[in-house]
Amino acid sequence: MTTVHVAGPPQMGGLYQECARCRYVLQDYTGGAVMIPEGQDLGIPHFPEGRRIAISGNAAWALADDVELDDDETECRPTS
């Protein structure tokens, strides 16, 4: 099952990011070192704010805004 989230703003310089709708943690590097290969940009990659992000197990990828959901994909539910 794949759940689709909406990326919130990156926090703490990109170390932490959660879903703007349900607050699911999309990435959390606050508890450990971030590995950046030598010669690559030192900026921490994050999902663009407002993008739809699909999560399935340990995999995460961005979806286009106009893409319809497949049968095995569901939107996350807002927290109250």
Image (cartoon, rainbow, N blue to C red):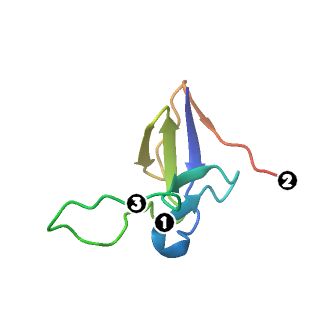
**How far is mark 1 from mark 2, CA to CA?**
25 Å
Give the number of the mark in front: 1 or 2.
Answer: 1
Which residue type does callout 1 highlight? Leu
Crowd tier of the residue under label 1, counting other residues whose Cα lies within 10 Å: few below 14, some 14–19, many 20 or above: some
Relative placement, left or right, of 55 versus 18 is left
Relative placement, left or right, of 61 versus 5 is left
Residue ID for mark 3: 33
Front residue of this view, candidates 74 and 68: 74
Q: Which residue in the rendered view is the most extreme toward the bottom?
A: 13
Mark 1 vs mark 2: which is more N-terminal?
A: 1
Residue ID for mark 2: 80
Which residue type does callout 3 highlight? Ala
**How far is mark 2 from mark 3, CA to CA?**
33 Å
Q: Which residue in the rendered view is the most extreme toward the right?
A: 80
Residue ID for mark 1: 15
Residue 41 higher or lower than 3, as above or below = below
**Residue 75 drawn at (x, y percent):** 63, 40
